[in-house]
Image (cartoon, rainbow, N blue to C red):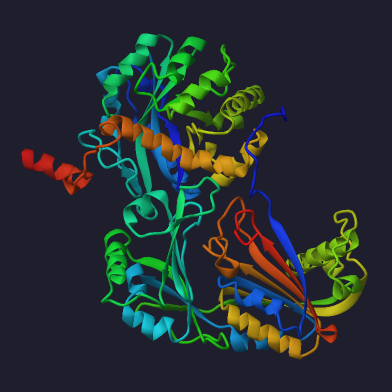
Amino acid sequence: MSSHIPLPKEKHNKSKLFVTRSHLLSKKHEHSKLIQTHPFNHQISIISQSTTVRETLAKYIGSYYNVTLKLSDFIDPAFISNYIKRNTLIALSSNRYIDADDVFAIDGQKLILSVGKDTYETLGLVGKSAQFPVERGSRFVVEIDLLDCMDPAKKYYQRVHNRLNAVLNEPMEFLVGYFDKNTGTPVTFDIPGATIVTPQVDTRSVPNMLVPNVPECLISTNEQTDTWTEHAHELFEWIGLATSCSQAVAGTSDEQTSAYTVPEPTSKDMHIVTVRGLLSATAIHSVINELVAAHTEFYVCVWGFDDAPVSWNSSEHNFYVSGENMYAQAYVPHKNCCLSFQACGPWDAFS
Amino acid sequence: MFYDLNIPLPEAAGKAGGHVSSQEWAQIAQTVEQARVLGYSVVALNLTLQGKLAPEHLSVWNTTPEFKNAQLSWDRATGARVGGATRSVGRGKIRMLRRLTAVIGDATQGHSLASVDGAYDIVAVQPTNDAMLLAACNGTWDAVDIVALDMGQRWNFVAKQKVVTQALALGVSLEIMYQPALAGEKTRQQWVSNAAAVVRATRGRSVIWTSAARRALDLRAPYDIANLGEVLQLNGDLSKRALAANARAALMHAFTRSSTLRAVIAPKHSAADEPEGLAKKARMAR
């Protein structure tokens, strides 16, 4: 195949991994901001020696709901005052693909409509051209601040209400999480027709798991030398293998089928707890705070929804050939250190 | 939305007096359903005809059966087109369009396409030599939306960039069908060569991926096609555009050409033009 074809340059074609080292006692709280600014989470895995992780998770992470609602129901003043303003409501349209369908979501404050060109041209609401796909004009994002300007007497509200009723008036299925603002624990969402869903919890114990020693150079410096980068990659790779319950880290793999070796391994009895559902960022933060207070090393991996319209800090997110927006963290409490790894797909504005 | 603008009808349907049997319709229905499951929102049933277009070529649509989970762009009873180009597709449904592909060996055959007069949603031409490719690309024939090239056969012409660029400037798309890539070794080799030539000539722009799938097993999911495009140096973004935005642009080109006055004025389709409305009209007229 000829390689001299001058095809357009690819601006957003590579997944990216951001590695951050943060001090647990620092005022910046970078490790906390990373968690709290990522609203749409669907899976968490915690790897730890502690046997009480499941109970800690159960204290903060609970049920969510399947609801069929119209979009205009979300902007109803009674709905906003009863739900949006009181606690944190996260909603994501079900069974809709961000690169093929119109996707609707609430990140706790804004109603986000990520719509295709045809829908946007008939919708009649002001939005902005989405960054992804890279070719502008095929996708648009409309954001409606539910905490502001949603006064029925104002023209803006009437306009939004009329257009949603005229164009997007069919009831749609949503995953809805309704959580306490401070702790992230689930709160009763008493909308008629809401079906409660319990998150799926898996626990697995791995005796004599091969756990790498977190290298001193990762903990003590931020200087990105080749060695530092290599160690960071190895740690991130190990976390991914561990959450997948790989035989390579369990020490049971065959040398002829797996060339992977754990760097500087120590054999420990570890427990992996995985929860799947619609998870509150605040709840995840509460869980991690409690585990940090217990002063044991642990590793966390959180995956975001591939079809969420936003990732960190309301950055636009889309699906290229993958839509990962996940992060992993390695906590070393006795050294007050946290290593964070944020993995973004190619079409993610955070990168 | 993902589009597949080439699900072919049987070859016999493209001949004068040709028809599609109920078993063949059943196979087409199975293919359309598989396309819906794979994530396609819009498909086009393609009638390929050799030579000049005649009115009896439209009769093949009279035997259209009912398709499950599908919104047809034509009325099954009367054959008349309904709806706009980009009418929204209901959740869980697939929109079906009608496409005509004329295999052109003679310039006069291309001029007969103007008599299609809006009966088909998309019109494609398949040139068989250099002169016909030039005519298809330079606007000699008004009624052309897609230039289709047989990807599985050796061409007796060269797809030059100068010629193809004229088509792109007119909004005409070039089609890459991937079914030959799933066929035998020789056909695959030829497919790679031909598809690479199209990508080279178009620089990845205004290319549309289609399946040309005669059965459900020949269909591939959009992301598999994005991976296949890497072989041709079409990155994932360009491949997804070829399945979505470019295909939509081809559809809009066809709609603008056939249903608007100078792309400024278009008729507004009322509820009476919907299939249910047309059937009701037909019943009341009896």
Which of A44/B251 is in front? B251
Q: Position of residue B99 (x, y in %)?
A: 37, 30
Residue A191 visible in the picture: no
> How many numbered discs sit on the rendered protein?
0
Of all residues shown, which one is farthest toward the right? A264
Which of B128/B159 is in front? B159
> With respect to residue A232, does B1 lie above or below?
above
- Residue under the point 41% across and 83% down: A83
Quadrant of the rendering where the C terminus of chain B is positioned:
top left
Q: Position of residue B112 (x, y in %)?
A: 31, 15
- Residue under the point 89% across and 74% down: A213
Residue B93 visible in the picture: yes
Q: Position of residue B280 (x, y in %)?
A: 13, 45
In the figure, is residue B253 to the left or right of A340?
Answer: left
In the figure, is residue A12 to the left or right of A155?
Answer: right
> With respect to residue A150, does B72 lie above or below?
above
Q: Position of residue A11 (x, y in %)?
A: 64, 47
> With respect to residue B186, does B94 lie above or below?
below
Where residue A229 sits, quadrant-wise, is: bottom right
Which of A125/A299 is in front? A125
In the figure, is residue B157 to the left or right of A258?
Answer: left
Where residue A163 sits, quadrant-wise, is: bottom left
In the figure, is residue B167 to the left or right of B263?
Answer: right
